[in-house]
Every structure is written in structure tokens, then in C-alpha cells.
Image: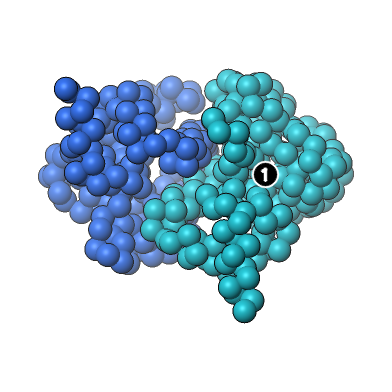
Chain colours: A cyan, B blue
């Protein structure tokens, strides 16, 4: 089992090697190919994912059949529909691999057992959700306030890792832009 | 000290009366008047607020001088700029009382001490942030997908408590609508 999750947890709370041996037994390693769907809209949201290497995106399909991305996760990020996961309900979202991805998955039941066995991880997950919540409030501010061009430029400047790795059509769907519009801005930027 | 926070915590984790006596000693009760500013953009984000009775809103002022609301908190909700609070940085947002409000406040330092003394509260705050994060992802879905009229109708239908209590201009600024537009929809709905 990768020690990447061990290092990531240790950035926020203190665990030792022995703890981590116990902790890792709750997770399953998965190697998923690009385009593989991990969670499907309309089904129960049963798993939480930690990306070791690769990229996932969470999206829904609107009434016009357009896909809209609401979240990305690259290396060292968690991803699930966190409300449906908490409330044990069906999800409105899909999670798909944006590229070939190595990840750790944990079911809701296992995560509850993990938190009982290692209650210090409550702090770790509290901080993860606190960061996610804060970031999504900031995103709302940008969506409200920036022009379409500013949204794109802000994103590529502040998140170069995402901008380079994630296909252009997914960035467009995350920022509420059309792929054509993103091509236009990129052409303008190069010229 | 109100037992309201005691009940709220007990909905998510188990604490007894003796624990709660200790827990409440970390909080300060405040009675704030409508329009009172609790946190100001450009200053450090030092407090977390739990609304006992009343309503707070968090907003920023954009370059055009327009106020945009990004969050509300009514009875039993927490409010702060959770990223700035976590990272001990200046905030871009203001928190103001939308009506006369009774609340409990806790500083960052005290909250860290509280979590050390009562680590079972990490679970409570983890769930609070998980709900907040999940709700803001859902809001993004609505903002992307609904027409302006649908956004307003969805909000008033799903959050009647907010819709009745919160002044119309604040609901407009939360939903990204102009107050004039909200008046129009309301007139249309009545007719």
C-alpha cells in the first residue's frame, strides 16, 4: 500500500507507522482507466475516493443533455458526493476518471469503522471538508463576479496543475463555458 | 448558557451534561442588533459563530460596489469564512446580522483548545463542514442550470424559513438576481 496517504494524513494529524498499517487495511487500491465511471447518477453513493495519481471529475447531465463538471480531484484529493455519502441517499452526480488513475477507495461502512478505530482521523476529515467548503464558496465568488475570460485566466493562473492535465472540454464544463469559447480565449492568449 | 447548542451537538455526537458545562465555557454569548457587522473584509477572520436565534449573512462587495451574499446562517447554523479561519489569513468577506440575532462566538484559539479538551467534537464539526460543502456543490448545480425564475422558485419552495425571514434584497444578492427582478417574479406569482 502506498505511503502517500500516510504522508497526507500526517500533514494534518499525527499518526505513526503502526497506526497506518491498521488504517490502510480499510482501503482498497484501484487502477482505473480513463473514462471509467466510478459512481453513477441515480445510484447510491457508497464510496469515498482518494486519488494517488491521476484525475477524477464529478459531473451531472442537465435536461438539455449537457455535462456539467462540479468538482475535480487530482493527486492527494478526496472525492465523493459528500451529502449523499453522509445521508446514504442516491446521488445526482457521476464520478468518472478523466485520465488513467490510481486511487484508494473506502465504503461508507468501512469509513465509519475506520473513524471508530482511529478517532484522530475525524480531525483530518474535518479539515479536508473545511478546505473543500471554503474553496467552493470562493468559486461562487468568481462565478458571480468575473467575466468569462477572467474566470478562465484566473483558473489557469491559480491552478496550472489542473489546467495542464485536464482536457479542455472538462475545464470548460467546470467553469460554465463552452469548449468553443475556451478555444477562442486560448487562441487570443497565444497571439 | 442556552442548551440549544447542547441539543444540536447531541444530534450528531453523544455528550453528557457535564461535558457540556465544560464545552460552553469556551463560548461567549452575544446579542447583536440588525445591521451590526461581526467580521469585516480585509481583517483577520478570528471567530466562528453559532446562531441561536436570528440570521447572519456573509457577503463581499464587488468592484462595481455591489454587495453579493454567499451564505446565510439562521438558528442552529454555523458561520465563518472557513478557509481564512483555518489558515489564519485575512478574509475577503463581511459577516453582518440580517436581523436582531442571539449567537455564540468562539475564537480560533479557543476552538483549538476546545477540540483538544473534547476531541469528540471533531466529528461534530466534520459533519457540519461536510453538510456545508455538499450544500454548496448543490447550489452550484442550481446556479448553472436553472433559469433565474427557477432559481428563485426553487429557493422559496425548499427553504421557506429563509424566504420568509430574510429581506428580499439579500435573497436577490444570494441568488445572483437584482432586487427588481425578484419583485417582478413575486408580482407574477401573486397574480
Q: Nearer the viewer, residue A188 or B43?
A: A188
Q: Position of residue A46 (x, y in %)?
A: 68, 25
In the image: residue B84, left or right of residue A84: left
Q: Residue at x 58, y 41 (%)?
A: A68
Q: Position of residue B181 (x, y in %)?
A: 23, 41
Q: How many marks?
A: 1
Q: Position of residue A143 (x, y in %)?
A: 44, 53
Chain of the residue under label 1: A
Rendering quarter of residue B1: top left
Rendering quarter of residue B61: bottom left
View extreme (bottom): residue:
A191
- The quadrant of the rendering that contains the C terminus of chain A is bottom right
- The quadrant of the rendering that contains the N terminus of chain A is top right
| Vertical arrangement, residue A10 with respect to residue A154, above or below | above
Rendering quarter of residue A117: top right
**Residue A117 shows in this picture:** no
| Vertical arrangement, residue B113 with respect to residue B52, above or below | below
* Residue linked to disc 1: A57
**Residue A53 shows in this picture:** yes
In the image: residue B25, left or right of residue A37: left
Q: Residue at x 64, y 27 (%)?
A: A41
Amino acid at each position: 500500500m502506498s505511503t502517500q496517504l500516510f504522508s497526507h494524513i500526517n500533514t494534518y494529524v499525527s499518526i505513526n507507522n503502526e497506526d497506518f498499517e491498521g488504517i490502510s487495511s480499510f482501503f482498497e487500491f484501484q487502477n482505473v482507466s480513463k473514462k471509467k465511471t466510478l459512481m453513477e447518477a441515480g445510484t447510491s453513493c457508497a464510496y469515498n475516493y482518494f486519488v494517488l495519481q491521476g484525475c477524477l471529475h464529478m459531473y451531472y447531465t442537465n435536461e438539455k443533455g449537457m455535462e456539467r463538471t462540479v468538482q475535480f480531484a487530482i493527486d492527494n484529493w478526496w472525492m465523493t458526493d459528500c451529502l449523499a455519502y453522509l445521508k446514504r441517499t442516491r446521488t445526482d452526480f457521476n464520478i468518472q476518471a478523466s485520465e488513467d488513475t490510481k486511487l484508494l477507495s473506502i465504503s461508507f461502512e468501512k469509513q465509519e469503522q475506520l473513524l471508530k478505530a482511529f478517532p484522530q482521523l475525524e480531525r483530518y476529515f474535518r479539515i479536508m471538508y473545511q478546505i473543500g467548503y471554503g474553496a467552493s464558496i470562493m468559486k461562487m465568488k468568481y462565478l458571480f463576479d468575473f467575466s468569462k475570460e477572467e474566470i478562465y485566466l484566473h483558473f489557469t493562473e491559480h491552478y496550472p496543475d489542473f489546467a495542464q492535465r485536464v482536457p479542455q472540454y472538462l475545464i470548460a464544463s467546470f467553469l460554465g463555458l463552452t469548449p468553443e469559447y475556451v478555444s477562442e480565449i486560448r487562441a487570443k492568449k497565444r497571439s
